[in-house]
Amino acid sequence: MSFNGICIHIMVDETLQKDTFDEVMTTSDVIKYLKVSRKTVLKLVHEGKIPAQKVGKDFRYLRSEIDAYLRGKDPHATASKSYFSA
């Protein structure tokens, strides 16, 4: 944006970005997001490739950790600051 020749930069708040990426997802959400079967998602969880927390009969996932998996990063590196830590 420009106002009387002065350039104004609009910055996105880091907290806003983090909240967007730390969305809590269900198994169904992850299936749709990754475009894979339920069996594949559960296999990735049991192999430790995708961190998850069991809630009732289903699992919950942090989107940031799913994204880290897609980028090929160690899921345990992001899990240390997970919402699921007690």
Image: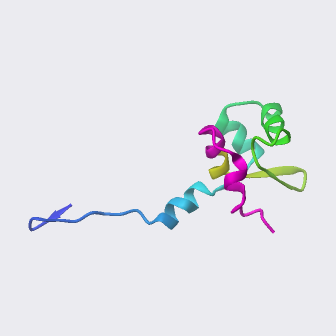
23 horizontally vs 83: left or right: left
Quarter of the image with the C terminus in it = bottom right
Q: Quadrant of residue 48?
A: top right
Residue drawn where x is 80% and y is 34% of the image: 38
- Residue 72, given in percent of the width and then of the height, sits at 63, 38
Q: Indicate the position of residue 40 as horizontal and vertical percent values.
A: 79, 31
Q: In the image shown, does 28 or 49 lie closer to the viewer? A: 49
Q: Position of residue 30 (x, y in %)?
A: 70, 42
Q: Residue sitting at 67 percent across and 49 percent down? A: 65
Instruction: Locate residue 41, reporting x and y percent.
Output: 78, 37
Q: Is residue 74 above or below residue 7?
A: above
* Residue at 77%, 44% in the rendered image: 27
| Residue 82 magenta | yes
- Say how many tags the image has: 0
Query: Residue lying farthest left?
Result: 4
Please check the rendered image and state whether residue 13 is part of the magenta-colored stretch, yes or no. no
* Quarter residue 35 falls in: top right
Image position of 69 with respect to 40: above or below? below
- As drawn, the residue found furthest toward the right would be 57
Give 33 or 21, whichever is nearer the viewer: 21
Magenta part of the protein: which range?
67-86
Query: Taking 55 as reference, is 74 left or right?
Result: left
In depth, the one of 30 and 45 nearer the eye is: 45
* Colouring used for the render: rainbow
Please identify the quadrant where the N terminus is shown: bottom left
Residue at (83% x, 32% y) in the render: 39
Residue 32, picture quadrant = top right
